[in-house]
Image (cartoon, rainbow, N blue to C red):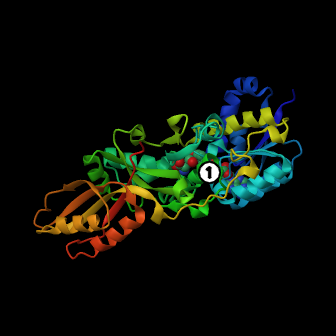
Amino acid sequence: MKPIHVGLLGFGTVGGGTFQVLARNQEEISRRAGRRIEVKAVCRRDLEAARALVGDSVNVVADPMAIVNDPDIDIVVELIGGESVAKDVVMAAIAAGKHVVTANKALLALHGNEVFAAAQAKGVMVAFEAAVAGGVPIIKTLRESLAGNRIEWVAGIINGTTNFILSEMRSKGLSFEVVLKEAQRLGYAEADPTFDVEGVDAAHKLTLLSSIAFGVPVQFDKAHVEGISQLQAVDIKYAEQLGYRIKLLGITRRRDELGGIELRVHPTLVPANRLIANVEGAMNAVMVQADAAGTTLYYGKGAGAEPTASSVVADLVDVTRLATADPDHRVPHLAFQPDQVQRIPVLPMSGVRSSYYLRLRVADETGVLSRITTILAENDISIDAVLQRESFEGERQTDLIILTHTTVEERMDRAQEFMQSLPSVLAPIARIRKEDLA
Ligand code: NDP
Ligand code: HSE
C-alpha cells in the first residue's frame, strides 16, 4: 500500500520528538499501521534549525499554509501551540479534507466544539491523544476501553510543570522560582508558563476529559481554575505533618442530584497513602471512577518530547488505519455520537462538595479555638482534626490548622467570612480543598 504522507506544523519540543520516534520506530510502526507513515514536510519559521534536524529528504517551510494546501499531504500534525495560527491551520486543513493530529489542548478546550463539528461535517478525523497527559493514553482509554461504563468522576494530576514544582518544593525545599526555571529548561512548561502555574493548562485538559467522560460539549469557560502561585510552603509542610500531600488536581464529577457536573482545578490535599499522592516530578496520573471497572489509575510521563510524541504517533497510526473507513464507523471525537452529546451544565463552585484544610494565624489567648469551632458548628461543618503549633517565639500568636469533614462550599464560604472577622484571627485564612478520592 502506498505510504501515508504527513506534514509536521511546528517543529519544536514535540515536533522534533515526533520526527525522531517516527524515524527510529519506522518498521514497527509500519507493521502496525499497514503502510509507511512518511514525514514529507516540516514547518517552523527558523528554517535553518529545522533543516539541521531533518536533512535534505524532507521539505522545510516557514508558512504552515504551504503544507495545508499541499495536495500530497494526507495528515496535518499541528504542534505549533496557542490559539490563533493553530486554529487557522486546523480549520483550513479540515476544510481541505485532511485529517488532523494535534497536541494542542488550548485550541481544543476553547474551540473544540467548532473544530469537531467542522471535522464531522467534512468526514475527517481530529485526533488529540497527546493533548492530555502527554504519553499517558487516557483519551483512548476513556473513549474506548471504558465505553461500557458509566463514569462517575475523573481526578488527575494533568500538569507536569506544577507537579514538578510541588514535588521539588516539598522534597528538596527548593523555591518556586528555581524549580519553575528547571521545568522550562526541561521542556515541560508551556510557551507562557503562567498557563501551567495558574492551572489554565490543567483546566484545558480537564475540559477535554470531562467532555469524553460524560458526553457533554467542551465547556472551558465554565471551569473553576486555581493554580499554585498563592500556595505557601508552610501549608505543604503542615499538610505533610497531617499525613497529606498537596497536588494540583483537575476534578470533574457527575452530580445527578443537582443535574450538573463539577469541573474544577485547584490545589488539593490528598492522603499521603494514596497512589496518586505519590506521583512525583513531571509525572501525570489520572484516576477514573466508573461503575463497572471501579477505580482505575493511569500513570506516566505527562510532558516532554518523546512521551508526547508517543501519543502523537499512536494517533497517526490510528488515523492511517481508519483513513479509508466509512466516517460513521469511526470512534466519535468526544466518545459519544454527536447527536447524543448532552448540554449538562457545569455547577457553580458554591454547590461543590469537599472537605477542607484551614490555616488560621490566631492570637494565642483563651477562647479562640472555641469561638472558631462554634462558627464551624453553626454552619453545620464537622471538624475532622485540629493541629496547633507552639507559639512563635516572642509573639503571642500561633497557627491553628483545622481539617473538616465534607461539606458544601457555600457553607464554608460563610463560615470563613465569620472566622475572618474575629479580632483574634490575625491574617487572611489559608483554605485548601481536600479530597479522599476513595
Ligand atoms: P515549542 O515551542 O517547542 O514548538 C513550537 C514550534 O512551532 C516551534 O518549532 C516553532 O518554531 C513553531 N512555530 C511557532 N509559531 C509558528 C508559526 N507562526 N509558523 C510556523 N511555525 C511556528 O512547543 P512544544 O513542542 O512544547 O508544544 C507544541 C504543542 O504541544 C503545544 O500545543 C503544547 O501545548 C503541546 N504539548 C506540549 C508538551 C510538551 O511537553 N512540550 C506536552 C503535550 C502537549 P519557530 O519559532 O522557529 O517558528
Ligand atoms: N506544560 C504542560 C505540562 C505540557 O507541564 O504538563 C504537557 O501538556
Residue 376 vs residue 205, the one in the foreground:
376
Give the answer, above or below, for where 424 lies relative to 278: below
Find residue 6 and report its image quarter. top right
- Is 234 on the left or on the right of 84, as rendered? left
Q: Secondary structure at mark 1?
A: helix
Give coordinates of residue 136: x percent, y percent. Answer: 57, 38
Residue 289 vs residue 264, the one in the foreground:
289
The C terminus lies in which quarter of the figure?
A: top left
- Is 335 on the left or on the right of 38, as rendered? left
Residue beneath label 1, please?
208
Give the answer, above or below, for where 87 lies relative to 379: above
Give coordinates of residue 202: x percent, y percent. Answer: 53, 53
Q: Residue at x 33, y 59 (%)?
A: 232
Q: Residue at x 21, y 61 (%)?
A: 399
Q: What residue type is disc 1 on?
A: Leu
Residue furthest right in the image? 71
